[in-house]
Image: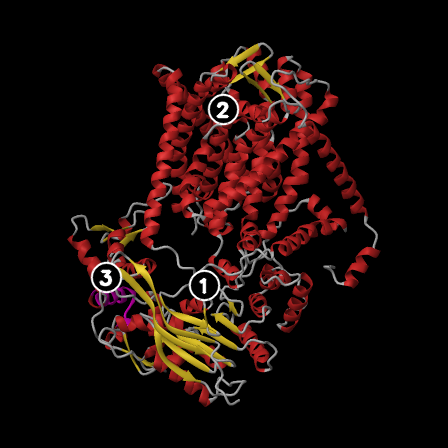
Amino acid sequence: MPIFSPSQAVRESVVAPNRWDFIVLSAGVAVLFMMAWGSRQMFAPYDLGQPLPISLDPSNLPGYALRTTLRMIAAMLLSLLFTFTYATLAAKNRRAETVLIPLLDILQSVPILGFLSLSVMGFITLFPGSMMGPEMAAIFAIFTSQAWNMAFSFYHSLRMVPQDLHDAAAVFQLSAWQKFWKLEVPFAMPNLIWNCMMSVSGGWFFVVAAEAISVAGNHIMLPGIGSYIALAIQQQNLAAIGYAILTMFLVILLYGQLVFRPLVAWSDKFKFEMTGSQEVPSAWMLTLLQRTRLAPKLFALPALLWELLRKLFRRTSARRSALLKPAITPRAEHLLDRTWMLFAITAAIVAALLLARLILSEVSSQEIVRVFGLGLITVARVMVLIALATLVWVPIGVWIGTRPAWSQRAQPVVLFLSAFPANLLFPLVVLFIARYHLNAEIWLSPLMILGTQWYILFNVIAGAAAMPNDLREVSSNLGLTKVQAWRRLILPTIFPSYVTGGLTASGGAWNASVVSEVVSWGSTTLTATGIGAYIAQQTVNGDHARIALGIAVMSLYVILLNRLLWNRLYRFARERLSFD
Amino acid sequence: MINAPLPLMQVNHVSKAFAAGDKGSLTVLQDINLELKPGEIVAIVGKSGCGKSTLLRIMCGLTPPSSGETLYRGTPVQGPVPGVSLVFQSFALFPWLNVLQNVELGLEAQDVEAKERRRRALEVIDMIGLDGFESAYPKELSGGMRQRVGFARALVVNPDILLMDEAFSALDMPTSETLRNDLLDLWIERLIPTQAILMVSHNIEEALLMADRVIVFDNNPGRLKAEVPVALMHPRDRESLAFRHLVEQVYSIMTTPVVSAESAKGAAIGLAHSLPGASAAQMVGVLEQINQPANQGSLDLPDLALAMQLGVNELFPIVDALELLDFARISGRTINLTRHGKAFVEADILRRKEIFGEHLLKHVPLAEYIRRVLDERPAQRAPEKSFLHELEDHLHKTEAQRVLSMVIDWGRYAELFAYDYHSKMLSTENPGSETEPGFQ
């Protein structure tokens, strides 16, 4: 059935594809071909202990980069699936919400790289004799770095959908399915896309770390950039490290230009605002696509699919809205709530007891105390580094943010820097420390913040750029001195976004500690005392009880730090320093 | 026609109450009976808080009534029904859908084929005067054009009944005038299949310009007060004597209290009285208008509304507050300054605050109570929460919140007590001595 009117259809078929079409078409075919090739490798047979040939020949790098990227794509698809189900359930079902949201909060605080060894063993047993085992473990590691904040963002968006739009959907009798795709997903889209893209940026770090892992004496090296660099470290091949960095640089550049920016620019149309925004984010890739004659037809595909689905499910869709259906009595509802809470609390206690039994059966109480001590050392490291990064980046961020010409140029660069996996640079730092015989305890510390400091800078720039112009004019009109202006105007306005950046940076630093407190170059291994090093060493030993202990203690510290510091700052910023 | 037309919609003994505190509930609608017959436009007007929007939500199945029922063509309404459309005050358009897609939305939910959807949507878009804007997104449109999309979306499903919830009040005067006239033209020329329109409005003139009968609601709790039939031919002339007479009649009905012990004038109000939502500045403005030399301390409400550009939703809270504080008296549709009102409006700023404070203590038990509690406390401080809890025993949660912030606003103006936003504490302190929050 033609969707377009005949005249329109004729007109479009007569006009030949334009030059934009040729560019996009050939690029599209190439991408499809590459994806088919790369994903075929994922299903190859594999047995634990079987060596995976990795070669440092730079000609292999494009293939490795592709494999790494495919892992990212697979993880992103999984994360989206998780987001749409988990967050929707939490937002729509009050009882599910009471369990799912605190659980998400805890999951967010667990160091991802810590339980990599556990998940690898799990997935290898799940997919025996297949490459899928280790592949899924790596994908799962990336997934855990992305899914939680995407789910949180989607959950919050779902709860923010304006009541009048809910009412409109009800009056015009949209089914739950229609409402989800026509109202709720579009409403959540700008935040979701932004979180997706930031998650992917963060994910490069984890894919590099997760490709090459040692579990209980077995070295698993999945073909990819992470394994390439791991091998380069083993063989002390400095040139290979250079090639890997260059490849990653190109991959992230392409990702930023071809995926990140077009998607963010596209999601602007879903912004819930009734005034046309002054500056629409631009992306040449999106513009290119929009100029082709082919792409709009491709974009019409979802609409056709939608129409098809509608016809398929027409019979089964329950038209009657159950809105006014009499609910169960408040008393029964209350009783059900109580039972549910009791069940949830019991389950949590049982889980905690099982974990405690696993740990206590193998680990002495002195060691547990020692691990808590190690945790404190890492806490100190994280705090000092965040403080240092703040001192450095806040003034710079404000300087850039208050100059529109600079901030527009700086933002993409900072985003790029935050996406670049800092662990690629670790070997260079090890070389530096070894060469000048520096104290590893001190000089390994900056590695934790190498990749995540950019979140502070990025958010401070954004906060400073959003400073209302009239407030700036008033303060110069009143003749405020520099100190007064910082105290009364600049700090209060950037503070909320600084807190967001600081929270992200601190979370990233915790995760990074697992790979940055023990770093090696060939046979040289540098170790800094801390809980990250403890987890890393137990991973190599394959000691599950001690890994669990390390993860539990670290999660506890992360949660405490978030509750005692960041959440309070966040509340303070929201209640006292926001305009509404 | 020989037979009396069957009612399209019947509202039978509908009441609505919300839970308030632990003790009881707050009734917003009480025993409403209403009929919508084919071929008529009915308007509901009333002071804010009279539950007229709640009634609309009940009628289109968005909210269940606490008791009573709504019948649409004889069948009880148990959720949104295909024959009833709603036009929103806030437009409620989907910003990510363009005009055409927004209009098609209701048809999509009714499983209309894509081709048919497009045809019908384009037809309505042409009819409502939106052609040329099919591919525009709501944010590109002006308020008036957005509401046209709202109307097109409501009309494309060929509703029997069109409900309008303050559909014109977010628009400026000329825009709403044009849109109203366009809608009336479609209605009178029978270009739309809609058989009855029910509109809720806080603009009396707007209601009288459109409706065949105007139903006046009383508030606290919301109930039917009177019905005014409007027999004038369209187009109606708002300057005509007959029209002015109707306007004055509706104002008179709205200001005449239903005779009952609790709401009779002069009777003392309780602690948890739903204080009218009017700021001190608004009261001063209205008093100054009444006290102008030309008005001699007495003014007709319709003239006051016109002079100050106020809808009834804004006018009546101010008038009620002035009466409550004994600054003005209503008789019929006329508002007169009292002796105190005159003294107040003619005083300077500081003296005004003193008079306001005296009247607040004397006539608003809640203000007097708060001040007394604060004076009795050793530190002259008390948390806002404690007062809120007491109010919540008698009022709905949001209403308790509103009443308390109203009395705090008045108390601050009169300098009876101070309030700290961050600590949520009320005190008798001089606001200047409070510690400053934020960055030092």
Q: Position of residue A467 (x, y in %)?
A: 50, 46
Q: Name the residue at 73% across, 37% down.
A: A32
Identify the main secondary structure in magenta.
Answer: helix
For disc 3, the marked residue is B367
Range of residues picked out in magenta:
B344-361
Q: Is residue B273 in sight in this rendering? A: yes
Q: Name the residue at 60% across, 38% down.
A: A77
Quarter of the image holding residue A174?
bottom right
Quarter of the image holding residue B28?
bottom left
Q: Position of residue B258 (x, y in %)?
A: 29, 78
Q: Of the residues shown, which amino acid type is indicated by label 3?
A: Ala
Q: What element carries label 3?
A: helix
Quadrant location of the C terminus of chain B in the rendered image: top left
Q: Is residue A433 left or right of residue A27?
A: left
Can you tell which of label 1 and label 3 is closer to the viewer?
A: 1
Q: Is residue A539 above or below residue B124?
A: above
Give the number of the disc on residue A114: 2
Magenta span contains residue A208: no
Q: In this view, does B413 lie to the left or right of A82?
A: left
Q: Position of residue B270 (x, y in %)?
A: 22, 66
